[in-house]
Amino acid sequence: MAKILDGRATSKEIRAEVAAGVEETRARHSVTAGLAAVLVGDDPASAIYVRNKGRACEEVGMFSETFHLPGSLSQAELLEKVRELNGDPRFHGILVQLPLPEHMDETVILGAVDPGKDVDAIHPVNVGRLAQGQGPFVPGTPGGVQQLLLRNGYNPGGRHVVICGRSNIVGKPLAMLLMQKAEGANGTVTVCHTGTRDMGALTRQADILVAAMGRPNAVTAEMVREGAVVVDVGINRVPDETRKSGYRLVGDVDFPAVSEKAEAITPVPGGVGPMTIAMLLVNTLTAARISIHGEP
């Protein structure tokens, strides 16, 4: 049976470090790291995500405020709100919760966030900085995956990392992050996607296999070699009549079968998800420090 890579436990370590940094920044400079979350519309899942992020901020001593705006809001009105937050010194980080209503262009909205407050690290400027290994921010989920590996003794350096998925949020930035010439990276990275022929032939070569496909149980035991480290980024709802909610959460990996072959594996939930929020806190603290010192 594989070792469980516990994202909840590892994220607690990071949150404790962030809390200490928040307190130091407050004590030395009278600055409290602040995060503004923008939620547009009434998507239940988005509301839960934003609430969880707000609670996480409170737990580490950060100032957090959620701006819940109606789904009927025009794009111009949302852009005006983003610009207002860009200029608000209380907030060092700005998070625009996705998805946005269909009548809004996410690329335009996200591009309006000040790159220095883009703690999701998805502004084109920050994507370019990541590609060049410059920082200062690391996208939440890719950074969470990297830290979960490193803090559990699985350095990607010199290992073959196979990533299933090429999204702008996970697959692409994770590939850029793990292939950097830097401590905690230096992996040999292969990215698989919907156009990949015989994906299993590639995944079976992986020392570290990352599934970020958005398809429940897409990675089967036959696709994993003995002793691999498997990181499941997916989170999918599947029907389950035995649950009060009528569904249960599963990842992109067939957990019961793959855990019999892997050396280590992340659970869903409780794996990558808590790490993503922890890295958002790290980025917000970094932004606060930059506002004081001009550098992290």
Image (tube, rainbow, N blue to C red):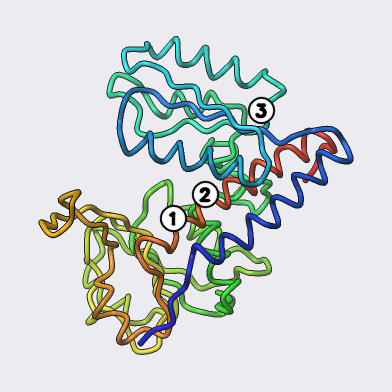
Rounded to the nearest whole Å, what is the CA distance between mark 2 and mark 3?
17 Å
Callout 2 touching callout 3 (CB < 8 Å)? no
Report helix, strand or loop for mark 2.
Answer: helix
Kind of residue sitting beneath label 2: Ile
Report helix, strand or loop for mark 3.
Answer: loop
Callout 1 touching callout 2 (CB < 8 Å)? yes
Kind of residue sitting beneath label 3: Phe
- Of labels 2 and 3, earlier in sequence is 3
Report helix, strand or loop for mark 1.
Answer: helix
Where is residue 191 shown, x and y percent of the image? 38, 64
* 270 relative to 90, above or below: below
* 16 relative to 206, above or below: above
Q: Quadrant of residue 27?
A: top right
Residue displayed at 70% across by 43% down:
285
Residue displayed at 76% across by 49% down:
21
Where is residue 228 shown, x and y percent of the image? 40, 83
Rounded to the nearest whole Å, what is the CA distance between mark 1 and mark 2?
7 Å
Q: Kindly identify which residue carries mark 1.
A: 273
Residue 277: which disc? 2
Residue displayed at 36% across by 60% down:
269
Is residue 192 toward the left or the right of residue 296 in the image? left
Q: Quadrant of residue 187?
A: bottom right
Is residue 216 toward the left or the right of residue 32 in the image? left
Rounded to the nearest whole Å, what is the CA distance between mark 1 and mark 3?
24 Å
* 60 relative to 62, above or below: below
Residue 91: which disc? 3
Residue 253: which disc? none
Kind of residue sitting beneath label 1: Gly
Residue displayed at 43% across by 64% down:
271
